[in-house]
Image (cartoon, rainbow, N blue to C red):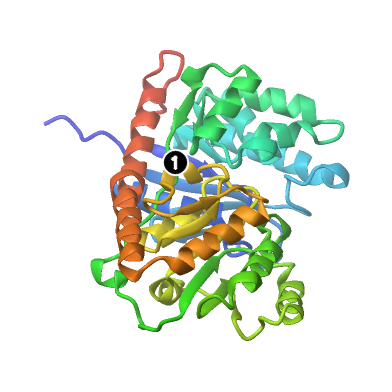
Amino acid sequence: MPPEPSPLRVMLVLPTYLPETYGGAEQQSRKLAATLLDRNLSVTVLTPCVEGATQLSGREGLLTIKRFRQPQLPNLGGRHMLSFLLWTVKSAYWLWRNRSKYDLVHIIHGRLHAVGPLLGAAISRKPSLIKIGRGGDHFDLAVVRRKRLIGSACAILIKHLTTGFVANSQEIADDFSNWNVDPSRVHRIPNGVVMPAPNDHLPTSNTPEIRFVYLGRLDTEKALDRMISGFAQVSHDHPARLIIVGDGPCASELAALAERLGVAHLVEFPGRVENVTPFLQMADFYISTSLSEGMSNALLEAMSYAVPPLVSRVSGVEDMVGDGVSGLLFEAGNDEDYVAQLRNALSLPSDARRRMGTAAARTMQQRFSMEYVAEKHIELYARFLRAPHQTRAG
C-alpha cells in the first residue's frame, strides 16, 4: 500500500495572541486552528509577545505556539520602529531556517507585522495568504501606507509578496480594486462560528423586559456613547435593559454617561467574562453601534444563538443580516436612524422576534459555520500548493 500523505502544515501568523490578548482575531484564529487540526492538518502559531512572563514556546493541545519576545508590538511603527525591525528580521529568518517544517504561511491581518513573514515565505518559496482585518477607511493596506517613513514601501511589499488575500466581506473585496489587485488573488471566505448545541438556544428567563446585549471591547470606535444615549431616549417607551459586556479604556466614562442620563439603573456593565453563553441566552437583541468592523465575531456568535441583531451597517454586516428578516440595521453614526430601529425593536411582538432569531441562526448554520469556513480554507491552501511556481516541502 502507498504511504498516507503527510498532513498539510500551516504556519498561522498573528499580530498578538493569548495569554496577552484575546480579541476577535485571536478568538476566530484559535477556533479555525482547532477545526483545521480536527481535519488532520498541522498548525503552528507564530506571534510576538511583550510580557516577560509569557512563555516563548508551548502547546495548546495539538496546536504549537512559537513566540518572539519584543520590546513593543511590531504593528506600532513610529517611535517603536526597533520592534518592527526586530520582528521582521526574526520572523523572516526563522521561517527560512524552518522552511522544511511548513507548507504555507497564513497571516492574520495585513499590517506591519506581515512584512517579516511574507519575506520569510518568499525566500523559502512558500505560498502566503493574508486575511484582511478591516475595510473602508481602516483597510489594512491603507493603514500601513499611512505609517510614517516606511508606510508606502511596506504597503507595496505586502501587496506584491502575498500569494493571495482573504476578504471576509464584500466591502473588503471591493477595496482591493482601489489598489489594482488582480481579482483572482482575492478570495471571499467569511469568518466562522462554532454552532451551539440546540439546547443552548433556550432562554434563561421570561420577563417582559426587552434586553439588549453588547459583547466586545469598550473603546471609541464601538461608539458605545451613542448606544447609551439612544437607549436613554427610548427606555421610557417600554421596559428595557442594556447589558454591555466587556472591558476597555472607555469603561468608566460610559458608566458616568449612563449616570448623567438617568439610566444607570437600566444599563449594566458586567465587565469581561469568560463565558458569554448566559448573556446570549437572556438577550432579546444583540446590539452594536460600531463605526468600523471587519466581520464581527460577537455578531456571528449572537446570531448562532438565534439572537436577532440590531446593528450598524459596517463591513461584513450586510453579508450576514437581512434587514427586517434576520435582524435590524441602521446607518453607522446616524443617531436618528439608530433610535428609530430601537423603537422598532421595542414594538416587535415576541413571535416576530423569535422568527427573526430563527432566520439569523439558519443563516449562520448554512453559510458561516466554522466547519464550512475551514473547508473553504483547506480548498484554498490546496490550490496554492498546486501552483506551478510553488513546491511543497517533503
Task: Provide residue 77's location: percent of width, then percent of height.
Answer: 80, 42
Q: Nearer the viewer, residue 146 or 30?
A: 146
Task: Provide residue 58's location: percent of width, then percent of height.
Answer: 51, 59
Task: Provide residue 68's location: percent of width, then percent of height.
Answer: 66, 51
Residue 261 visible in image? yes
Task: Provide residue 185's location: percent of width, then percent of height.
Answer: 50, 21
How many badges with numbers are in the image? 1
- What residue occupies the far bottom of the structure in this picture? 265
- What residue occupies the far left of the structure in this picture? 1
**Placement of the N terminus among the 4 image quadrants:** top left
Q: Nearer the viewer, residue 380 or 310?
A: 310
- What residue occupies the far top of the structure in this picture? 388
Q: Quadrant of residue 283?
A: bottom left
Under mark 1, the amino acid is Asp
Query: Is residue 293 shown above or below 141?
Result: below
Name the residue tied to disc 1.
Answer: 319
Q: Nearer the viewer, residue 306 or 9?
A: 306
Residue depicted at x 52% and y 23%: 163
Query: Is residue 71 shown above or below 122?
Result: below
Within 10 Å of the Cα at label 1, are there few (<14), some (14-19), or many (20+) other Cα atoms? some
Secondary element under disc 1, as helix, strand or loop, is helix
**Placement of the C terminus among the 4 image quadrants:** top left
Residue depicted at x 60% and y 61%: 339
Residue depicted at x 73% and y 29%: 154
Residue 160 visible in image? no
Query: Is residue 163 shown above or below 336?
Result: above
Query: Is residue 318 shown above or below 72?
Result: above
Residue depicted at x 52% and y 47%: 295
